[in-house]
Image (tube, rainbow, N blue to C red):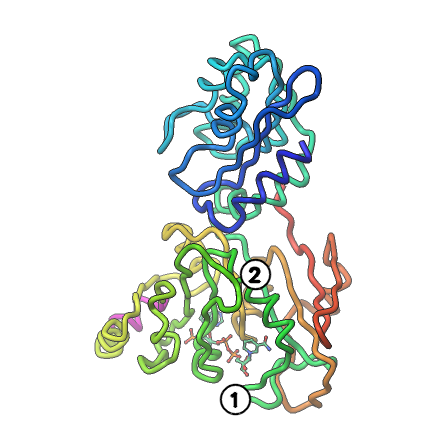
Amino acid sequence: MARALANATRGLGRTTPNPVVGACVVTSDGVVVGDGAHERAGEPHAEVFALDEAGARARGATLYCTLEPCAHTGRTGPCTERIIAAGIARVVAAMEDPFPLVRGRGFQKLRDSGIEVSTGIGRHEAVRLNGPFCTSILEGRPFVILKAATSVDGRIAAAPGERTQLTSPAAARHAHGVRAQVDAIAIGSGTLLIDDPLLTCRHVYRERPLTRVIFDRGLRAVPGARVFSTLSDGPVIVLTSTASHGLYADRVRALEQAGATVAAIEDPSLGASMRTLVGRGIHSVLLEGGVAVHQAAWDEALVDYAQLYVAPIALGTRGPGLAGPSGSFLASLSEQKVRQLGPDVLIEGYVHRPH
Ligand SMILES: NC(=O)c1ccc[n+]([C@@H]2O[C@H](COP(=O)([O-])OP(=O)(O)OC[C@H]3O[C@@H](n4cnc5c(N)ncnc54)[C@H](OP(=O)(O)O)[C@@H]3O)[C@@H](O)[C@H]2O)c1
């Protein structure tokens, strides 16, 4: 199973709206004869690659897979049929597929065909790899990673309205690695207007277009913002309120002329905005700030994972402080990791782990 889980990581950041899945085929005398990973939506599933590689050696062997094999026809045929036809004797799967069309049916189909099925081994790790898939299916919203950079005294900028570079190139490289894997990066209109970020994925390879989202109920985003010069990297969605959309037709037009997709929703909560994104195929969001949208994400219990880059500088008391629940949320992060990135320190962990 450890090998199947390692295979699964090959699809990280590439399979949305599908899950990340790995598989391997092992003969009764312990020889690995096939490996597979689901690498892109629309391409064959991990089990199919592993069975293809195993060929005739799959007969009587065990298939390890990180997710329940599918029993329905989606963009590809059902994996259960391939497993049965290959003569697999035993399937060991880390977790049940939470997708309603599949849940439990894959296992049932295999058992009905006389295949021994065991589940649960490696479940914790398999669920971790599939945070975006599980959260979007079970909660109807994307998996949210809250990211912030702060000074040692907890400030995210030197003064209100002042763009402040806090962290080192080493921390930036790491942050771009995270950008390479998520479906979208999101900020509030305040950060757009003050920092005017590019919101692109640099220094690392990213295979898919990267969606950028601006939460902007008051429709304050300006068409001259730098993010609109990066449309070759992916779409920019300005998510506003239906009231502003009706009221400011000229601003909508100007933003659309700049290349933005302007979408409007009635419900002003951040949760409603997040749920809208799932309908646009976004299952993971890196929420990069600023204070107001971070606070809304905490208040509405939308934060799944937090990443805090702490720079070894003190900024005093003028600038805005880090948003968050009262008391230190850092102490209560689960599976916490602390790591040095040049002069900075990254503290990260789960706030809400999918299960
Ligand atoms: N150090 C860091 O990591 C970091 C990162 C980003 C930003 N920053 C700093 O943060 C500061 C900007 O903070 P900010 O609070 O002005 O920016 P923000 O959170 O990026 O944007 C605030 C705006 O977001 C809009 N918004 C849309 N949906 C919202 C919702 N559900 N809840 C709350 N607001 C929502 C609000 O305008 P509407 O009411 O019109 O929708 C609000 O005025 C700047 O100083 C910037 O440099 C620091």
> Residue 296 lies in what quarter of the image?
bottom right
Residues at marks 2 and 1 touching, judged by CB atoms closer than 8 Å:
no
Label 2: how many residues lie within 10 Å, few (<14), some (14-19) or many (20+)? some
The x and y percentages for residue 289 are: 54, 72
Kind of residue at disc 1:
Gly
The x and y percentages for residue 19 are: 50, 40
Does the stretch in magenta take in 242?
Answer: yes
The x and y percentages for residue 102 are: 47, 28
With respect to residue 220, does 29 lie above or below? above
Task: Determine which residue is flagged by label 2.
Answer: 178
- In this rendering, position of residue 42 left or right of residue 122: left
Task: Determine which residue is flagged by label 1.
Answer: 161
Q: Secondary structure at mark 1?
A: loop
> Residue 54 lies in what quarter of the image?
top right
- In this rendering, position of residue 307 left or right of residue 338: left
The x and y percentages for residue 13 are: 51, 51
State the residue at coordinates (51%, 23%): 51
- Per the model, the C-alpha gap separating discs 2 and 1 is 26 Å
Kind of residue at disc 2:
Val
With respect to residue 223, does 86 lie above or below? above
> Residue 119 lies in what quarter of the image?
top right
Does the stretch in magenta take in 35?
Answer: no
- The magenta stretch is 238-246
